Amino acid sequence: MTERHEHAETARPDHRVSVVVITRNRREELLRTLRLLRELPERPPVLVVDNASSDGTAEEAAARFPEMTVLRAESNLGAVGRNLAVARVRTPYVAFCDDDSWWEPGSLRHAADLLDARPRLAAVTARILVEPGGEEDPVVAELRDSPLAGPPWLPGPAIGSFLAAATVLRADAFRQAGGFHPGLWLGGEEELLATDLQRAGWWLSYAPELTIRHAPSVLRDPTARRVVGLRNTLWFTWLRRPAWAAVRRTLHLARTVPRDRASVTAFGRALAGLPWVLRARVPVSAPLEARLRTLEKAQEAGGSRRYVG
């Protein structure tokens, strides 16, 4: 293929991937992201779920980007807002991004190529570059150096979880696994879905050729995010890990998280949800638990999950 033909191929629209964005009260950041998504050569269908913003986010997005679908939730659904959008997706693949992140040109097309060629691959996670400097997010090293074994046909290292805002998923696999669990709301919600995908025989992979850029919102509340993230880690542990592993993981977290009000709040909220967690508890098989344990050791040694802030 000549250089001219290669350029024409990468410049044409590619509607195999829809993009789903969730947002709440970040109007200016969302508008920047939608502008950048509009400029992608793939021209993907874009669905925005507004989680009950009070700053006119939904109205402004609908007015400025009439070709995009804007869904208005009546309350803040968190990650479950993505489920609403995926229910409307008609493409075989769906890419998530947040209102403070955006996909690099060509990455969606390449992700679709990777998934087209590998029918048992459920998701590919991209390299994340943090703006304004463009340095790699610390989690990228953990993805790149994943200790998990996988089949040789994977496009990169096998991974045990993913980051929703940097991942392209097979839409049917997402739906079959139930999407994001409403109990977890938002914050580390991917771990449960990733595990349930693997239980169903799907594979997840890091694909370094894909790139997404992230400009962390200045409107974030890091302490609130830490509380929810730690709570959800505990809930995932109690929902899917065998009893002995759940006890060990819980004790490890109790010993290692900061001894402050946020950690106490997270543990308190996790314990308050124990009744529904126990009712929904379905431990994984021994082989999958072995993979989770391998991943857990790598996370404990890594630097991207410290529950600080």
Image: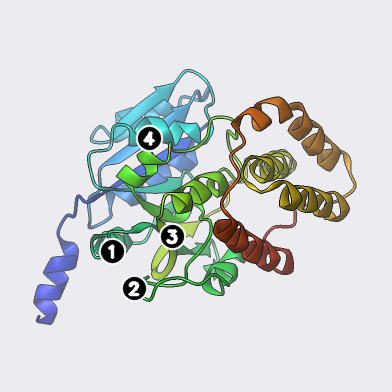
Where, by quadrant of the figure, is residue 126 drawn? bottom left
Say if mark 3 contacts mark 4, CB within 8 Å.
Answer: no
From mark 3 to mark 4, how far is it between C-alphas? 25 Å
* Label pair 2/4, CB-CB below 8 angstroms: no
Q: For this view, does 128 lie left or right of residue 31?
A: right
Label at residue 268? none
State the separation of the CA atoms marked 2 and 3: 12 Å
Mark 4 neighbour density, 10 Å: few (under 14) some (14–19) many (20 or more)? many
Which of the numbered marks, if any, corresponds to residue 118?
1
Q: Secondary structure at mark 2?
A: loop
Tag 2: amino acid: Trp
Quadrant containing the N terminus in the rendered view? bottom left
The disc label shown at residue 204, or none: 3
Q: Which residue is mark 2?
A: 153
Say what amino acid the circle numbered 3 marks: Leu
Comes first in the chain, label 3 or label 4: 4
At label 4, the amino acid type is: Val
Give the percent coordinates (x, y) of residue 61. 37, 32
Which of the two residues, 218 or 20, is positioned nearer the viewer here?
A: 20
Q: Would you place residue 210 above or below residue 169 in this image? A: below
Q: Is residue 11 above or below residue 68?
A: below
Other-residue count near label 2 (Cα within 10 Å), few / some / many at <14 / 14–19 / ≥20:
few
Q: Which-is-in-front pick, marks 2 and 4?
A: 2
Position of 93 relative to 79 (above/below): below
